[in-house]
Each structure stands twice: as C-alpha cells, then as structure tokens.
Amino acid sequence: MAEVKTREFNRASSLSIQDPQLRRALQKVGTGFDAARRENIVEVTPEVWEQWRERARQIKLHTLDRLDYYLDLLEQRVSQAGGQVHFAKDAAEAKAIVSAIVQRNQVRMAVKSKSMVSEELGLNRVLESLGVEVYETDLGEYIIQLAGETPSHLVAPALHKTKEQVSQLFAQKLGVPPTSDIEAMARVAREVLRQKFLQADLGISGANFLVAETGTLVIITNEGNGRLCTSAPRIHIGITGMEKVIPSLQDLAVFLRLLPRSATGQRLTSYVSMVSGPRRSEDEDGPEQFHLVLVDNGRSRLLKDPDLREALCCIRCGACLNICPVYQKVGGHAYGWVYPGPIGAVVTPALTGLKDAKDLPRASSLCGACREACPVKINLPRMLLHLRQQLVESRDPQQRAEDGGEKLLAQGYAAMMGRPDLLGLARGIGRVLQAPWEKQGKLEKVPAPPLSLWTRSRDLPSLAPRTFHDIWEKELSRAPEVQR
C-alpha cells in the first residue's frame, strides 16, 4: 500500500492553511468547478437533475446488493472477449499480479492513464523496482510525477501548482526554455509523451465504470491519453476497485450525464473510451493482451458495514471537494493519502484503519454541502458522525476519563439551550468578555481556547447586541393591531 500519513493531518493542515498561493488556487479551481456544476443543474432543470441523481443512486445500491453476481458476469464477459480477469484481495496481491504480467512479458516501459487505485497501491514504485520506466500521461499527473509529489485533487491533481512553478519544473526536468505560455507547456508535454506512447510495451489505466453485461471498461478523459494508453501498447492492464461495476450500458448513460457535470461542469467530456478485451483479428489497432485487475483492499469491509457501505457508491467526481469548506482551506495533501476531501475522510479510515486516520472524520464542519453536491446522494455527514462515534467508543477507560470534559461541555450546552434564563445570562457574560477582541462585528485573534482554535485562522462573528426575541418583541409592539 502507498505511504499513509493520515496521522499528521492536524500538522499538515496547519501548514497548508498558511500557504497563500495554495489558498488562491483552491479558491479559483473549487469555485470554478462548482459554479459550472450549478449552471448545468439550472440548464437541465433541478427537477431532472434530481431524477438523474436518484436513478444513479438506485443503480449503485442495487449493484452493491448483488455485487458478487455482477462481478461474476463481468468476468464471464471479459473472458468471452479474450481478456483475463484477476481478483486481488489486498495491495500485496494486486502488485504481485501486475509484477507477474510485467516479468512474463519482459516489459521495459509503461504509460499510465490516471488511476487512483494505482496510487492507492503505490504501483509506480513496484514497476520501477522491476526495471520498468513508468510515465504518467495525464498532464496534471505528469507534472506531479516530475515534481515527485502526489495528487491533491481527484480531478485536477496538480491544481496546487502555478504556471510559473510548472515552467520552472519543465525547464529543470525536460531542459526546455522557461515560458509563461500554458499552451506551449502543454505542447512540450505532448511531444515528450507521444514518443512514450509509441515506445511503451504496457499501458495501464484505471476505470470510471465497468459494464457487467458487455465486459466493457469505460474511461472518461479530456486529453485523449486514456485512449492512447489502452490502444497503442501491446499489453493493457486495467486496474480498479471492484465497486466500479455497473449492470448495463443503459445504466452507463445515466452516469455519463452526471459525472462530467459534477466534476468540471461539462455536458460531456472530450473522450469516452470503451474497451472490451484485446484486439481482434479485424481490428486495426489495440493491445494483444487485456488484463483486468479488480482490487478489494478493504472494500469488502466497507461492503459489510451497513453504516459505511454507501461510500462505495462514489464515482470520483470531486464535487464534494470543490464545495467543502475544509478542503477549500487546506487542500488534498493534508489528508495524507490518495483520497482527499469529505469522501476521503470516510474512505481512508475504512481502507487504512480508523486508528491510522483518526483525525480525518473530524476534518469536517458537518455543514452538509458535500451531500447536496454529490451526484449519487451519498450521506457523507452521517458517515462522518458514525466514524466519530466509533472513535469515542474505541477509547480505553483512561482516555475516556481524560476526555470527560467534552461530555461535560455537551451536557452544559444542552442544559443552557433548554433554559432561556441561563441562555440569556450566558449571552450577557459573553457580550462583556468579547469586548476586547470585537471589531466591526467580528472577533479577531482571541488568545485563549477554545475560541483561539477558531480565530487563529479566521474571524468569528461576535454575539449580536440584540437577540432575535428582542427584535421580534420590539417589531411586534410597533405593528398595528390585527383587525378580527
């Protein structure tokens, strides 16, 4: 499995939030994608959009309930088309399967189209240890490969890089003159990678969807690199999670409407590539061998958990990242593993172990925006609360005693909110105590906890001079008497 640094979320997020360039990039990309998504919803009408969402959700839930049947059907169809299906129970087995294919076919160069599961497995390092040159071919993935970094977003993996940084990186790694022209930089990458496509023995791709009834691997891209990876080399390995299967091409049509609109705000991506087995005798191009590696690696645990299995419905659109107030401040690298944002805060603890990702379920304001944005209506806030509950229940008696203050605070808050007189008293005291740090209706840099934990990175609205009840009673007293 790839290196996991989820224990460091608090420290990493504290550093990220102090990076102004990262904050600007996150704001620009996140709000741009989300604004485009909202425009598309208006275009198709909210009523139709909700019908698509509900249909997609039902397809996913239906498939998860019968996953063994559809995986068996998928294997049959792929085999009938001349391909081979490999099931990997964990990361070690998946890497062993790929290694065996590589060694058996004496592979020396591999090109890859963006695959989150290969990142999950740390596959590049395994291939390199076997003497294979590996090249990421998605432009964003290629940039971060040159930089020796990991993706920071499900859709835009290099969003944290400025064009100036990319220009300097290309100058250092590729020996080209620096330029601020984005098209010129893309052309440089295209020229380098085109030769790799032609020289590679192996193409590795992920999969957006796997269609059981036809044994088809579906890849959705905007650059066409996925199509080259799956057709130019003599061997194609598709490697993906077992949850990517859907029943039919008719079902695929629903997701082709939802995924691009949710991810980037496009009606449809530039390329929808559908691969069904290796090259046939009448085909002009395509691989000689097609291998489909279906990875479990903890997904069975998710499937068995009635409180978390819904996370397997995710179609990796990134919509929850684009709208999440936490992700928008700290970016993807702070989450410490492959899957960032709200979905990562649920999936990562389930796949790596809650103990190794204990900070991630708390990396949420529980505002519910992620659920509203999700094209398959995954209830992420509910699952985050469930994981928080598991964290509390997993504490030993000594920890629970040490953390008893949280329980007392919750009980005190509940008592205060149930007693208007206590709430009024607390509000009056708060109005007095906030005075030294209040400025234009905001509290800035409060020195003592718990408020200092909030105000060290953002302002906090101050307690208003008048309560809603005060305003209501005053306005009501001014209103003319209602004529009966």
Image: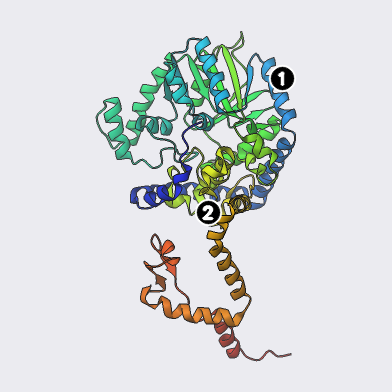
Q: Amino acid at mark 1?
A: Gln
Work out how far the residue at label 2 is from the one at label 1, CA to CA, in angstroms: 42 Å
- Residue at image mark 1: 76
Residue in the image at 44% along x and 26% along y: 137
How crowded pointer 2 is (Cα within 10 Å; few <14, some 14-19, many 20+) is rated as: many
403 lies above or below 240: below
Residue at the image point whose x is 49% and y is 21% from the top: 228
Q: Position of residue 197 (x, y in %)?
A: 44, 18
The residue under label 2 is which amino acid type?
Answer: Ser
Vertical placement of residue 296 versus 445, above or below: above
**Residue 411 drawn at (x, y percent):** 60, 69
Q: Dots 2 and 1: beta carbons under 8 Å? A: no
Residue 238 vertical placement versus 143 (above, below): above
The secondary element bearing badge 1 is classed as helix
Q: Is 461 in front, or is 420?
A: 420
- Quadrant of the drawing holding the C terminus: bottom right
Residue 66 is left or right of residue 281, and the answer is right
Which residue does the numbered mark 2 point to in the structure image? 364
| CA neighbours of label 1 inside 10 A, class few (<14), some (14 to 19), many (20+) | some
Q: Quadrant of residue 258?
A: top right
Residue closest to the far front: 398
Nearer to us in this view, 228 or 15? 15
Badge number at residue 477: none
- Residue 413 figure quarter: bottom right
Give how far across and how far down residue 118 sits, in percent: 51, 28
Is 477 situated above or below 217?
below
Q: Nearer the viewer, residue 325 or 8?
A: 8
The reply to whether residue 28 is visible in this rendering is no
Look at the image and tell me whether residue 58 can be seen. yes
Label 2 residue SS: loop
Nearer mark to the viewer, of 2 and 1: 2
| Residue at the top extreme of this rendering | 281
